[in-house]
Image: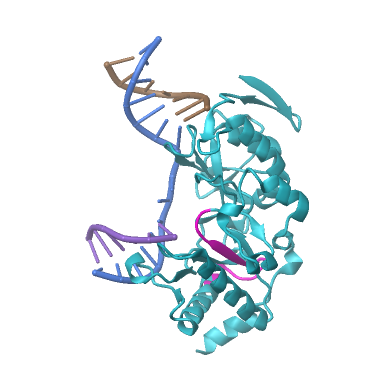
Chain colours: A cyan, B brown, C blue, D purple
Amino acid sequence: MAKINIGGYDINITNHNKILWPKYGITKLNYLEKLISLSEYLLPFTNNRYLTTIRYPNGVNKDFFFQKNKPKSAPEWVDTNRYHDKEYIHLNHIATLLWLGNQGAIEYHLSFNPINKDNYPSSLVFDLDPSEGQDFNEVIEVALIVKETLEGMNILSYIKTSGATGLQIFIPIGSKYDYDTARNINAFFGQYFAEKYPNKITIERMVDKRNKKLYFDYLQMWEGKTIIAPYSPRATEFATVSTPLLWEEVENGCHPRDYNLLNIEDRLKKKGNVLEDLLDESKAQDLDFIIKYINKK
DNA sequence: TGCTCAC
DNA sequence: GTGAGCATGGCTTCT
DNA sequence: AGAAGC
């Protein structure tokens, strides 16, 4: 057991040689070092959100569990926010991140709404998920269709890998639209894309009815639901990281596996945070004209 | 991982 | 003392 | 109502 001091807070590091990613032999100490370099990018997104972590205390191939509440054993300096009768850990400090990392927290999932704006998601999110056996180039193709269609409507969008199988497209909306309205807009886009590209895109909920098409999941924004944070590691064998990308990088070809704990520092040094606009209220897109159009129909 | 509880 | 159990969620859509 | 899906 080693004690480190970070940002003025003491953290006990236990089992630092325990292997969390067997494929690459990434130990807990390796992982904590990676978290330090990720923290500058991850923390601005986790700040001011309700956090759900997924913990793998014995590595990504072993048992896991979800955690929302601050455990009794947490250091007293870990901040929390009460929400839906729970004491959510507030991931607003690098020491909190490293404490969680030592606890085996691998994945960091966030509420769509900021703290204290309970009914207002800050972005629309489209989840593009390939069906079993689908080539990733088909995900890219659809992502670019979506981006260009939105551009044609004068709407800016952003993209990141989920770190698992697909891509996630974001449209920042500030606090303009409540969950019901945001879901209505998402449903409109889902139907629009599925109708316009019926042999590429499906919004079918049942897996066996998707016919190897790309699943455009527009149905995930609910109060209390979560999405993987930008720059969060994932509990995959390849140690992937949910990585924001520039659209030109998507055009040039990309794969979720290309972005992982082993190479993320390099990328961050070169590209910085390419999702900064999501943190900037002034980048909120105006979708009032979509709502008017939906209401007319 | 780290706690609590039953045995 | 050792070992088991625990640490989330709830809504939507389909059948 | 219950299961599937996320």
> In this rendering, does residue A71 appear at all?
no
On the image, the x and y values in percent for residue A117 come to 62, 59
| Residue A291: percent from left, percent from top | 58, 81
Magenta stretch: give its range.
Answer: A164-182
Residue C8, above or below A278: above
Name the residue at 64% across, 50% down.
A231
Q: Is residue A280 magenta?
A: no
* Residue for point 54% across, 27% down: A18
| Residue C13 point in image, percent of width and height | 36, 71
Q: How many marks?
A: 0
Above or below, comparing residue A157 to residue A46 in the picture: below
| In the image, farthest residue toward the bottom | A296
Q: What's the residue at 50%, 81% (across, down)?
A: A192
Q: Nearer the viewer, residue A19 or A186?
A: A19
Q: Is residue A129 above or below residue B7?
A: below
- Quadrant where the N terminus of chain A sits is top right
Image position, residue A153 (x, y; %): 65, 83
Front-most of A49 and A124? A124
Does residue A178 show up magenta in the picture? yes
Residue A268: in sight, yes or no?
yes
